[in-house]
Each structure stands twice: as C-alpha cells, then as structure tokens.
Amino acid sequence: MRIVSFAGAIGVTMSAALCSGCLTFGVIQRSAGRTDRDARITEVRQSATLGHDLFLRLGVQSHKHPETRMVVLRVPFDEIGRLPFNKKGEPQPSPGAVRLEVDELLFQPPGVGYWVPDGEIPTGSTPVQAEYVEFGWDSLETRLAALPSGIHVLIVLDIDSYREQLAGPVLRNGAVPAGAHVVLARRVEVNEPETSHLWSFNEARKKNRAWLLLTPLTVAGDIATCPFQLLYALIMLGD
C-alpha cells in the first residue's frame, strides 16, 4: 500500500513539475519539504510589545485543515520593513528563522520575524490595539501618513471585504476577512513609517532527501522534454 502511495505521489509531483517547466526543480522542492500551499491569516487575536519586539497571536486557516489554529509570531522592531525576498524573488526568511509545527501543520520560516515555539506571548508585554483601515474613503496611505510614532498593527480591508460590509459589518474583534491583510508599521519621529505586509504563511511538508535519488531521471526528463517546456513557456507568455 505504501509503495502504491509513494508511486502515486511521484507521478503527481513529476506531472506538476513538468507543467511548471522543470521536473528537477519540483523534486528538489519536494525533498526540501516546500509546498505551494498557504495558510491565510484569519484573525489577530492579540498583539503586544515587550522590549524591542512585537508579538502577534494570529489565527491561521489551512486548505487541508480549515479549522483555525493559533500561532505566535515575534517581530523585532528593526525587522519591520525588511524585504522578505532576495533579488531573484525567492523567499528570504529572517536570519536564524526556523520552521514551526503546530497541530499537525508545518509552516516554513515566516517572511518577517520568528515563530514562538511555545505559542505564548510573554507576560508583562504591553498590548497594541489592532486598527481597521477601510477600503476607499480611508486609504492605507492616508492612515500611514497620520500614524504617530510607535508600533502599529493595521487590518486592511480590500474591495471584497468592503462589499461584505454592505450586507453586514465586519466584526471589529481582530477578524481578518478573506482578501484583507495585516500591516505592521513602525514610525520613528517624523520619518516615513516602515511597513511589513502579512497575508498568509507558507505551509511545509516533512523533508525527505530520498526524493533527490530521482534527480538523474528528472535531469534526463528535462533534457528530453526541453522543447515542450519551451513551447509551454511561450504559450504562457503569449497569454
């Protein structure tokens, strides 16, 4: 049964990788435990500062496990505004950031900050009230320009969230509706505020280096299918 399941997983992975243009890349991603699945942020349950760190207790919702799970993120003040990608557009976590496992879910290191493994905000921290920014008549740019010095947590509603309010108001209890996102802002005196935007967290799977044994086959497959991959890329660019 396990052999059949593994063979099926190989087939799915290689098919998906072929469609994306690179069998070898897909196998390397699989061996490293990377996925293209994201768990979106559904709630800012609590936010607080202690020392030079901002702590966030966030509700997240996975495609595989739709029930909300809570995670805690620690963001040093000086990392707010740090770009979470390198020059190639690849994810670039904070130095020393590691994965997190919580309730059968695995998460890659966050784009900004660090996971708190025990899922607790330290005692003695100072609460930070999350603020809502409406779509349209109270834009994010206007709100950021008016922020006083300090650390701020904003929940920014998008056009879909705004339309939902027409049917019924968004609960102002830290809920993050679908399409909305969280903005962390740090303002020092009269300088422009530094910001980091949080929509979701990349899920992970267990690392399995055995997948690398397939690379001789995938390299040969990439060479053999290179014309088809090139044609596929040209078609996608044409669209």
Image (spheres, helix red, strand yellow):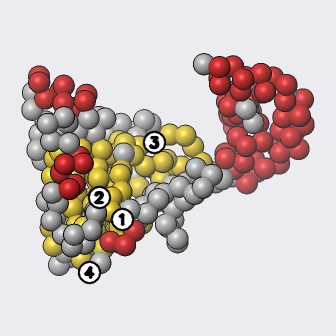
**Residues at badges 3 and 4 in contact (C-beta under 8 Å)?**
no
Name the quarter where the C terminus is drawn: top right
Asked whether residue 228 is in view, the answer is yes
Which picture quadrant has residue 184?
bottom left
Q: Residues within 10 Å of mark 3 (few under 14, many from 20)?
A: some
How far apart are the two marked residues, 3 and 1, measured between alpha carbons?
Answer: 21 Å
Q: Is residue 190 above or below residue 83?
A: below
Q: What residue is disc 1 on? A: 80
Q: What residue is disc 2 on? A: 184
Name the quarter where the N terminus is drawn: top right
Q: Nearest to the eye among marks 2 and 3: give it.
A: 2
Pointer 2 or 4: first along the chain? 4
The kind of residue tagged 3 is: Asp
Pointer 3 or 4: first along the chain? 3
Q: Which mark is residue 51?
A: 4
Q: What residue is disc 3 on? A: 38
Pointer 3 or 1: first along the chain? 3
The kind of residue tagged 4 is: Gly
How far apart are the two marked residues, 4 and 1, measured between alpha carbons?
Answer: 15 Å
Q: Nearest to the eye among marks 2 and 4: give it.
A: 2
